[in-house]
Image (spheres, rainbow, N blue to C red):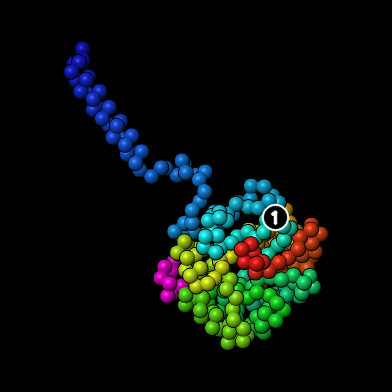
Amino acid sequence: MSNPNRRGAMALVSASLCLVLAALFYFADPPQSLTASAPAAVPAAADWGLSFPTEGESPVGNVSAEDLAQYNAYYLGDTSQKVLYLTFDCGYENGYTEAILDALKKHSAPAAFFVVGHMVESAPDIVRRMAEEGHIVGNHTFHHPDMSSISDLTSFQKELTDLETLYQETTGRPLSKFYRPPQGKYSEENLKQAQQLGYTTVFWSLAYVDWNTDAQPSAEEAYAKLLPRIHDGAIVLLHSTSATNAAILDDLLTKWEEMGYTFAPLTQLPGLS
């Protein structure tokens, strides 16, 4: 037979262990599974991402519009209106930007072109045309680095101001104060730094894989992504290096217009206009 005193001692030890574990669980950070439904705060560093629970409705960003707003950052525009904000990332010129500009001009559609240093240096006439035709030219940094790996303000600022200087020298105009993080890589510190420098950070709520020049989607594949997922207040990201975008943009804008959409510049984002 077992010793009653031994059983009592074991019970006391077990009870003590349970109390210790309960205290550790209570005072420790809760496990991720318990916080999954909580609103996402701005991370230390991350890639911008979206999910589309329902086609035709605003997607969910990996940071909420409300959390971004405190840093003067956006991924959605005015969701109460059938309005779209067209934006293009321009890393370099490979023969398609002028066709894109032609389509925008035909539809009287304003857009924002986020350029890097190489684009301004190698295609100054096209960059000047963007500005002359009333489009916003935004800051995509001079060298297109991973900005989330840059923590000090001086280095962060240099990537932006070097592009500002080059653009001013090239066009005789000041660069607009709209900033898009290269590759969608960002951090809370970056958002603060951009805001401190007077910039509005612009992510996006609709994009597709159009950037790979060696594997361009067909027109049908592009429409399959860009038509069902369009939504009120969408900030649309396209790449000016895409042959598909150049080929379909006129028809794509027509299709969106037939769906009741109009186009607005980023200067008309809620809180800016």
* Tag 1 secondary structure: loop
Which residue lies under the disc numbered 1? 80
- 148 magenta-colored: yes
Does 108 sit left or right of 151 as displayed? Answer: right
The image shows residue 169 at horizontal and vertical percentages of 58, 87
The residue shown at (47%, 77%) is: 158
- 49 magenta-colored: no
Residue 266: in sight, yes or no?
A: no
The image shows residue 99 at horizontal and vertical percentages of 74, 75
Does 233 sit left or right of 255 as displayed? Answer: left
In what quadrant of the picture does the C terminus appear?
Answer: bottom right
The residue shown at (49%, 56%) is: 42
- Residue, far right: 258
Magenta range is 146-156
Residue 184 lies, with reference to residue 21, above or below; the image says: below
Does 156 sit left or right of 61 as displayed? Answer: left
